[in-house]
Every structure is written in C-alpha cells, then in structure tokens.
C-alpha cells in the first residue's frame, strides 16, 4: 500500500482565526456556545470545551445569551433570528467566506441565479444559499444542477444570467471541471 501525505495539513486560516477570537472572547464573556462545531476535529472541540466553548446543534438548543457564528458563516435569516432572540453574536466568519457571501448576495440582487459548487449540507454552503435569497442551488455534480433547475430559471436555449461560485474549501481544479461539465 502506498501512503500519500496531504500537501496541506492542520487548520485553515479561517478556523485558526475563529479559535483565537473565541478564546479571547471567553476572557470577556466566560462560557460561549457556537452554532455547530468550530472545526471538524473532535480533539480540538474537546479542548475548546475545557475553556468554555461548547457547540450546539441548532438555535433551539442555545441556553445562554452569547452565541458564536463559526468560520463557516451563517445565512442572513439565521442571523436575524438570533438577534430577535436577544442573543449576542460573536461573528467569527472567515474573511474569505465573507467575500463569498458578499459575492453571492451581489449576484442574486443583480438578477443572477446562483450556482454554488459545494456540498449542499455543509454549513458554509447552507449559509451561502441563504445569501442567494432563494435564487441559488448547490451541488458537487453538474448533472445535479440540471435536475434542480426547476428551483432556478434554467431553461435550454435561453440566455441565462448565472453566477457560479465555489465553496471556499473545494479545489480549483474540481471547480474548473464542474464549470466545464455545466456548460457542456
């Protein structure tokens, strides 16, 4: 068996930043809940729990008045719902994810349908879809976009106004291949 070592190891910039911000925030606020785990790493989640940073699965499980948005970001509807519950938000959304959110929002407001190359159930992608305001669809397979076309205004032989963006953790080569399949 051949073992290949990944070129990138460890936490990404956005997660490192989120962890730092959360640890700093515990000095001011004490215990903090996060909407979902800060990182997909059980050991780090357990380490953070020891300093008072605890993930909750959904908004209804929040017990305190301080809630952190992870580096994955959140949809505007979710952010609004948190605010209506008078919960203080600590936003650790990755700056790169924030740029993607702003791009999706701008595309949707400009009349574009938005296609997101990414895992539809991933927290980042769910948030991006929220910024598309009902004008978005997400998939890793271009064929899936065609089957979802009823939710968009995709019709054959019509000029389309499409904006295509990638989940920030997807590879550039896979994104290029996705676009090639989409326009084929």
Image (tube, helix red, strand yellow):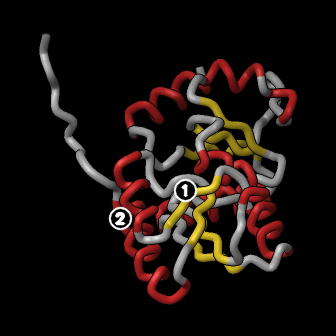
Residue highlighted by disc 1: 72
In the depicted view, which residue is nearer to us: 21 or 55? 55
Q: How many other residues sit within 10 Å of disc 2, few (<14), some (14-19) or many (≥20)?
A: some
| Residue at position x 58%, y 35% in the image | 119
Q: Quadrant of the C terminus?
A: top right
Q: Secondary structure at mark 2?
A: helix
The location of residue 44, given as percent across then percent down, is 36, 54
Residue 34 position by quadrant: bottom right
- Disc 1: CA contacts within 10 A as few (<14), some (14-19) or many (>=20): many
Horizontal side of 61 relative to 93 (left or right) equals right
Which residue is rendered at x = 58% and y = 73% of the image?
91
User: Which element is circle 1 on?
Assistant: loop
- Whole-percent x and y of residue 96? 47, 62
- Specify the farthest residue to the top: 1
Q: Looking at the image, is mark 1 or mark 2 earlier in the sequence?
A: 2
As drawn, 53 above or below 145: below
Image point 87% across, 28% down: which residue?
150
- Expressed as whole percent of the image width and height from the top left, the position of residue 158 reads 82, 30
Q: Is residue 165 visible?
A: yes
Viewer-closest of 43 and 89: 43
Q: Label 2 belongs to which residue?
A: 16
User: What percent of the width, then of the height, locates residue 142?
Assistant: 61, 24
Q: Quadrant of the N terminus?
A: top left
Q: Which mark is residue 11?
A: none
Instruction: Find the distance from the CA under tag 1 to the CA under tag 2.
Output: 12 Å
């Amino acid at each position: 068996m051949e073992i290949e070592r990944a070129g990138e190891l460890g936490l990404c910039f956005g997660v490192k930043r989120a962890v730092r911000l959360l640890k700093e925030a515990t000095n001011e606020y004490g215990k903090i809940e996060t909407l979902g785990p800060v990182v997909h790493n059980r050991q780090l989640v357990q380490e953070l729990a020891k300093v008072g940073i605890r993930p909750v699965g959904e908004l209804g499980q929040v017990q305190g008045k301080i809630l952190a948005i992870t580096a994955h970001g959140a949809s505007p509807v979710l952010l609004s719902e948190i605010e209506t519950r008078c919960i203080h938000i600590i936003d650790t959304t990755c700056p790169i994810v924030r740029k993607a959110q702003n791009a999706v929002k701008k595309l949707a407001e400009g009349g574009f349908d938005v296609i997101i190359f990414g895992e539809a159930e991933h927290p980042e992608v769910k948030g991006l879809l929220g910024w598309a305001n009902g004008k978005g669809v997400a998939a890793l397979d271009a064929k899936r976009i065609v089957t979802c076309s009823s939710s968009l205004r995709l019709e054959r032989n019509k000029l389309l106004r499409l904006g295509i963006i990638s989940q920030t953790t997807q590879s550039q080569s896979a994104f290029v291949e996705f676009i090639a399949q989409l326009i084929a």
